[in-house]
């Protein structure tokens, strides 16, 4: 009976369509907006692709590095704007032992694992589960189901990130992850490259920075922590008092790329403040994480938005997170999430305008 054949064929197509549409969403670009403050996000890697903000003259500019097309993000090796996981930063020897079991990970940084492995969470397509472009609560929620064994990590993990705009000029990032069936390390981080003078305004060496941390976790030549937690006092790492990023950078090999142990015992901690005098823009960073990787884009050479070529020190990154390689250092705060438990990492950027910073 032809009509039956047609019906089952239709159902088959419908089924195919349903399977394809629920398992793999299209890659899209989503904007959230509040007046002259707007942020664009893509569900490819849950990345922030632009942040538009006024300067001291009221002129709006884009203050994060990135690309013009999704294809360029798919080729990206810098992690521009990405949401990093399952474990951001490095894991030494690409392995760890948890409760007697050795887990071998994908090594993608010499013998080590960087930012979750070859794909991590920054080269996969996330689901868009909520989206409100404007109004009183502009926000987007992206979710990702990381499968048991993905990149070598144990257990299924349900990950979510919500980017939201709040008054006045606040961008909040709420990262959560629920372990479904096995204990696993989790360390999510937002990896935007900030240049408050504008993404194509040159280097950030004259920016004034304050970092609310008296200690760093020193690293070996592969950037794996030695396990020490050392005072910043009398070192180029001391940003306890605001000063220019470039003022002592020559004492380092190529620039800053180090995890700071944040001082505050509060749940929501002061992380850093940055001031770009030319534009007048200020960014304050607060987070619930115990550490922040401060990175000055030391090896960056990359063609980006509008064909502009980003050079070393074209941006600052404040990757709030757990300590690098924590899973191999029992003296670092634990990053293990047990089944049924939810990891929560809150991050808040507050933008403002300031002509002079009197305290430096
Ligand atoms: C991506 O990388 C490939 C290989 O290097 C290159 O041929 C291609 O042009 C790149 N695509 C974009 C959009 O940059
Ligand atoms: C997207 O949602 C669908 C339907 O809930 C689910 O089957 C799929 O695994 C999700 N994809 C990701 C990447 O989380
Ligand atoms: C380790 O194993 C013990 C005994 O099986 C169990 O009670 C505990 O919850 C496990 N810990 C983790 C982090 O999985």
Image (cartoon, rainbow, N blue to C red):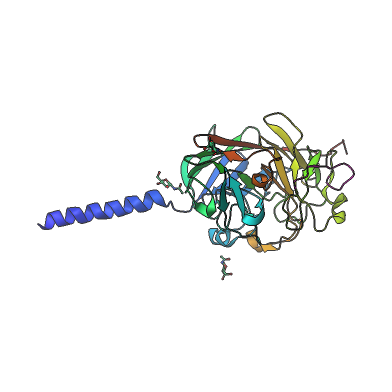
Residue situated in front as seen by the camera: 57 or 20? 20
Q: Main secondary structure of the magenta part?
A: loop
| Residue furthest to the front | 100
| Residue furthest to the right | 234
Q: In terms of image quadrants, where is residue 167?
A: top right
Say if 101 sits above or below 166 in the image.
Answer: below
Q: Quadrant of the N terminus?
A: bottom left
Q: Is residue 70 visible?
A: yes
- Residue shown at 37% from the left, 51% from the top: 21
Task: Say left or right for 120 vs 208.
Answer: left
Residue situated in front as seen by the camera: 211 or 230? 230
Q: Position of residue 244 (x, y in %)?
A: 84, 47
| Residues rendered magenta in the picture | 227-237
Q: Position of residue 305 (x, y in %)?
A: 63, 59
Q: What count of labels does the image hold?
A: 0
Q: Quadrant of the C terminus?
A: top right
Q: Position of residue 102 (x, y in %)?
A: 57, 50
Residue situated in front as seen by the camera: 219 or 42? 219
| Residue furthest to the top | 266
Q: Is residue 170 visible?
A: no
Q: In terms of image quadrants, where is residue 267?
A: top right
Task: Say left or right for 170 vs 161.
Answer: right
- Residue shown at 59% from the left, 40% from the top: 336
Q: Position of residue 178 (x, y in %)?
A: 51, 38
- Residue shown at 68% from the left, 51% from the top: 193
* Residue 224: in magenta span: no
Say if 112 sits above or below 217 in the image.
Answer: below
Q: In which of the image's four quarters is ligand 1 placed? A: bottom right
């Amino acid at each position: 009976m032809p009509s039956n054949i047609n019906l089952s064929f239709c159902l088959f197509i419908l089924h195919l369509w349903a399977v394809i549409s629920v398992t793999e969403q299209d890659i899209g670009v989503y904007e959230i907006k509040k007046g002259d403050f707007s942020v664009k996000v893509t569900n490819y890697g849950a990345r922030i692709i632009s942040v538009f903000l006024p300067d001291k003259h009221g002129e709006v500019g884009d203050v994060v590095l990135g690309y013009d097309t999704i294809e360029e993000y798919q080729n990206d090796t810098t992690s521009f704007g990405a949401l990093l996981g399952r474990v951001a930063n490095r894991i030494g020897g690409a392995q760890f032992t948890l409760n007697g079991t050795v887990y071998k990970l994908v090594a993608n940084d010499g013998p080590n694992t960087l930012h979750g492995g070859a794909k991590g969470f920054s080269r996969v397509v996330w689901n868009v589960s909520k989206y409100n472009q404007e109004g009183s609560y502009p926000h987007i929620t992206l979710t990702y189901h990381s499968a048991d064994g993905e990149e070598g990590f144990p257990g299924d993990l349900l990950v979510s990130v919500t980017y939201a705009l709040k008054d006045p000029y606040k961008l909040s990032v709420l990262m959560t992850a629920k372990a479904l069936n096995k204990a696993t390390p989790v360390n999510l981080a937002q990896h935007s490259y900030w240049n408050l003078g504008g993404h194509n305004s040159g280097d950030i060496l004259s920016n004034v920075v304050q970092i609310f941390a008296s200690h760093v976790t020193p690293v070996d030549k592969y950037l794996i922590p030695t396990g020490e937690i050392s005072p910043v006092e009398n070192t180029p790492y001391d940003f306890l008092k605001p000063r220019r990023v470039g003022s002592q950078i020559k004492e380092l090999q190529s620039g800053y790329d180090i995890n700071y142990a944040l001082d505050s015992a509060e749940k929501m901690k002061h992380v850093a403040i940055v001031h770009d005098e030319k534009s007048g823009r200020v960014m304050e960073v607060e987070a619930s994480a115990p550490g922040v990787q401060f990175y000055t884009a030391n090896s960056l050479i990359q063609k980006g938005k509008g064909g502009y070529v980003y050079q070393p020190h074209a941006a600052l990154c404040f990757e709030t997170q757990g300590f690098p390689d924590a899973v191999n250092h029992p003296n670092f705060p634990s990053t293990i999430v047990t089944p049924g438990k939810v990891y929560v990492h809150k991050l808040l950027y507050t933008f403002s305008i300031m002509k002079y910073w009197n305290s430096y």
